[in-house]
Amino acid sequence: MTTSECYTCGMEAEFDALPPRERIAHDRHWRVAHATGTSLPGWLVLLPRRHVTAVHDLTDAEAAVLGTWQVRLSRALRAVTGCDKTYVVQFAEAEGFSHVHFHIVPRDGALAPEHRGPGVFGLLRAPESERVTAARADRTALALRAGLAEQAGRPS
């Protein structure tokens, strides 16, 4: 796969024009987007801003902030969605999505047992009628941005 065939790299190439759901937060190494095709509001994807297909190929600089992003996003999801916990998952195996990415998935107490753990991926390819709309994903994105900004303003 070339970077021109990579969905993530295609989105990165349009960075300045991306809607809130595709650019919730970012730094020079990572971009945060709301997942597409999911029925679960707040399902996030943490993406390296350069094309990389394996975790072992992350630079030391990318790796140094990876855990911080995962924790900050988990905290923001808890504040915005009220979730009990988050799942953090990385596979990067789907056709067109071999670019490394981490799913940061809010899991609340009401989530059906069949959708807990790996079963949560059943919510990722939801029927069109059940998917989070672009407008709702944008609203969630803006709330998460505010939550992340609030975190940044608090002493650690």
Image: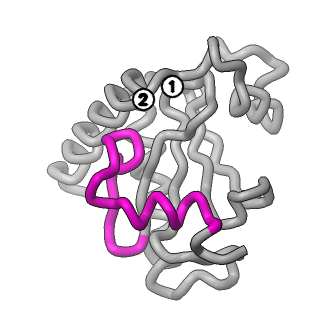
Image spot of residue 108 (x, y percent): 59, 22
Q: Is residue 8 magenta?
A: yes
Say what secondary structure mark 1 lies in.
loop
Q: Which quarter of the figure has residue 114?
A: top right
The answer to whether mark 2 and mark 1 are in CB contact below 8 A is yes
Q: Is residue 102 above or below residue 105?
A: below
- Of residues 57 and 97, the one drawn nearer to the viewer in this rendering: 97
Image spot of residue 104 (x, y percent): 57, 45
Q: Quadrant of the N terminus?
A: bottom right
| Range of magenta residues | 5-29
Residue at 35% over, 31% down: 138
Image spot of residue 56 (x, y percent): 69, 82
Q: Is residue 52 above or below residue 37?
A: below
Q: Quadrant of the C terminus?
A: bottom left
Q: CA distance from mark 2 to mark 1?
A: 7 Å
Q: Which quarter of the figure has residue 137?
A: top left
Q: Is residue 128 magenta?
A: no
Residue at 48% over, 22% down: 133
Which residue is denoted by mark 1 in the rendering? 41
- Of residues 66 and 35, the one drawn nearer to the viewer in this rendering: 35
Which residue is denoted by mark 2 in the rendering? 137
Image spot of residue 139 (x, y percent): 32, 26
Q: Amino acid at mark 1?
A: Pro
Q: Is residue 22 above or below residue 68?
A: above
Label placed on residue 125: none
Q: Amino acid at mark 2?
A: Ala
| Crowd around label 2: few <14 · some 14–19 · many ≥20 (10 Å) | many
